[in-house]
Amino acid sequence: MLIQASCQIELEAIGHVPAVFMLRPRSGASQFIVKEEYIVDPLVQITEYTDSYGNLCQRLMIPPGPFRLESRVTADCADQIDVHTQADWVPVSNVPDEVMQFLLQSRYCEADKLGGLAAEIIQGYPLGYAQVEAIRQWIYNNIRYEYGVTNSSTSAMDITLNRVGVCRDFAHLGIALCRSCNIPARMVVGYLYELDPMDLHAWFEAYIGDRWYTFDPTQPQPRGNRIAVAYGRDAADVAFASYFGGVNFKSLHVQVEAAQPLPISPSFS
């Protein structure tokens, strides 16, 4: 499906403020970037680099006063995420070097404290995909989705105690539970078509069967038509905006809709 997504940020800077944004998705196995626009007002110089996770990062200096940034993208996305119930667990000794970091604890994912809960959830399930799906279903069935009750410091352990959170928290818990089972897991942020209410979204991927698979604990069933923007160990690695100075955040507006098919250029014989 062809999807058009946009993210508009409005803020006001107190003086000149260095900033890094992470709002440009890359083409990958489940998405092909057809068209994109990156708009800043007022106009400033932007440089781009790729971080250690392969994310595209836009670096700029926000001038004093009101500032607006908008990223627009049209992407051809997979209608369904890949589901492979027979995908096997990968022994730690066989995990690729570049994937090993996603087995380690990270700031918001205290895997060492969740081993007991993880063992209870996956008991009786075959190694691999079935275990991760059991984790996803447990989170969906046992954690209440609610805005405004968690914050940027909330961790996976907090969610197990309070049993309430948003997509970011659901993803952190899924990641921590997977890692406690020696299953590599990473966070993904991006867009999900027909998400209600509309916002930037977060989910997680698990490395099983020698590849990454998508799991979204906020949804009752696997759903495709999503655009991945950034990957990391947890939310600390995938912030869509990082400011190094005084900034008053004004608004964030996200829109995701079906895009019209692009016109086909006529051929001449």
Image (cartoon, grey):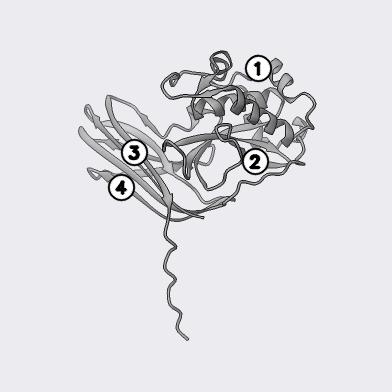
Mark found first going from the N terminus, 4 or 3: 4
Viewer-nearest of discs 2 and 4: 2
- The mark that comes first in sequence, 2 or 1, is 1
Q: Tag 4's secondary structure?
A: strand
Left or right: residue 225 compared with residue 86: left
Residue 219, position as x, y percentages in the image: 56, 35
Where is mark 2, residue-wise?
Answer: 213
SS of the residue under disc 2: strand
Q: Do callouts 4 and 3 mark residues in contact (Cβ within 8 Å)?
A: no
Foreground pick, 3 / 152: 3
Q: Which residue is mark 1?
A: 114
Label 4, on which residue? Answer: 39
Circle 3/circle 1 CB separation < 8 Å: no
Under mark 2, the amino acid is Tyr
Q: Which residue was labeled with disc 3?
A: 253
- Please say if the residues under marks 2 and 4 sit with CB atoms less than 8 Å apart: no
- Vertical placement of residue 81 versus 166, above or below: below
Q: Amino acid at mark 4?
A: Ile
Q: Amino acid at mark 1?
A: Leu
User: How far is the residue under mark 4 from the one under mark 1?
Assistant: 43 Å
User: In 3D space, how far apart are the residues under numbered discs 2 and 1 (Cα atoms)?
Assistant: 22 Å
